[in-house]
Image (spheres, rainbow, N blue to C red):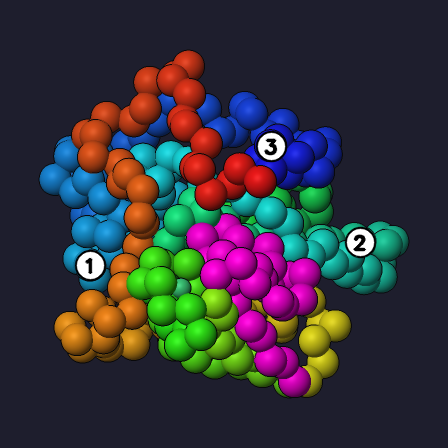
Amino acid sequence: MVANRRRQQRGRRPAQKRERQPVEWDPKTKLGRMVKGGKITSMSDALRTGLPLREPEIVDILLPETDDEVIDVNMVQRMTDSGRRVKFVITVVVGNNDGYVGLGQAKGKEVGSSIRKAIENAKLNMIEIKRGCGSWECGCRKAHTVPFAIKGKSGSVEITFKPAPRGIGLATGEVAKKILRLAGVKDCWAFTSGKTKTTVNYAKAVFNALKENTQMRVMNSEINKIGIISGSLGITAETEQPIPPGTEQPTPPEEAK
Ligand SMILES: [Zn+2]
């Protein structure tokens, strides 16, 4: 249901067409060739190679079930000799609702094509996040919140996420909600400072906090105690081939409300 609603909100964009494209792709990078050749079959392995992720098709194959949401559309006007020029700066979040999320931006004369470019850029920025039950009030050991407090900053905006017990939901601003939801975080407290109305900086601060979470080293004892999981809880793309067209992806159970 949520997915459908999201699709409608996207409005004029031909969402379906983009999502079910058969992947006819001639990889140009080492990582791309490894993914197409079936040597790498999960996003986790792809990121772990440390090779640069330069082709969005890599994400299309390894995470075929991503969703995206436009975070911000900023119109920039400029006067030139030949008249008024309008450009759009688009900020987009892409995620699989289960451990992987990316933030991307693109600039262009036309909204639709800029959104598509921003989505591609978001895929190239994809990170694997850690989830767990970092809440001492909860202790359920399920991966529903952040495993520990994380902090991110961009411009004047600073945000701290803290683990919340199950059922709290995302006690954050709207922009953070969009990003955390697509990352697969269910419950979270947030504390912010700075100009949080600057949507783009706010979004970047959220993403930077999640990045910090990604890079944090954890000990095995903590992994067991808090139930930390890095990446997806659900099925990763084990297939060498892209999902054949017409095959419906099951809706992740956590989306059911
Ligand atoms: Zn819990």
Using the image, determine if residue 85 lies above or below residue 3. Answer: below
Tell me where the magenta segment starts and ends, as one range.
166-193
Q: Which mark is residue 85?
A: 2
Residue drawn at (66%, 35%), measured in percent from left and top?
5
Q: Nearer the viewer, mark 1 or mark 3?
A: 3
Q: Classify 10 Å Cα crowding around label 2: few (below 14), some (14-19), many (20 and above).
A: few
Q: Which mark is residue 48?
A: 1
Residue drawn at (60%, 47%), measured in percent from left and top?
69
Query: Helix or strand or loop: what does disc 3 sit on?
Result: loop
Q: Nearer the viewer, mark 3 or mark 2?
A: 3
- Mark 2: C-beta under 8 Å from nearest atom of ligand 1: no
Q: In which quadrant of the rendered view does residue 11 lie?
A: top right
Q: Does residue 187 belong to the magenta stretch?
A: yes
Give the residue type at disc 3: Met
Marks 3 and 2 sit apart, C-alpha to C-alpha, by 40 Å
Q: Of callouts 2 and 1, which one flags the residue occurring earlier in the amino acid sequence?
A: 1
- Mark 3: C-beta under 8 Å from nearest atom of ligand 1: no
Residue 209 in the figure: left or right of residue 5: left
Q: Which is nearer the eye, 9 or 47?
A: 9
Q: Which is nearer the eye, 89 or 39?
A: 39
Q: Of callouts 1 and 3, which one flags the residue occurring earlier in the amino acid sequence?
A: 3
Give the residue type at disc 1: Arg
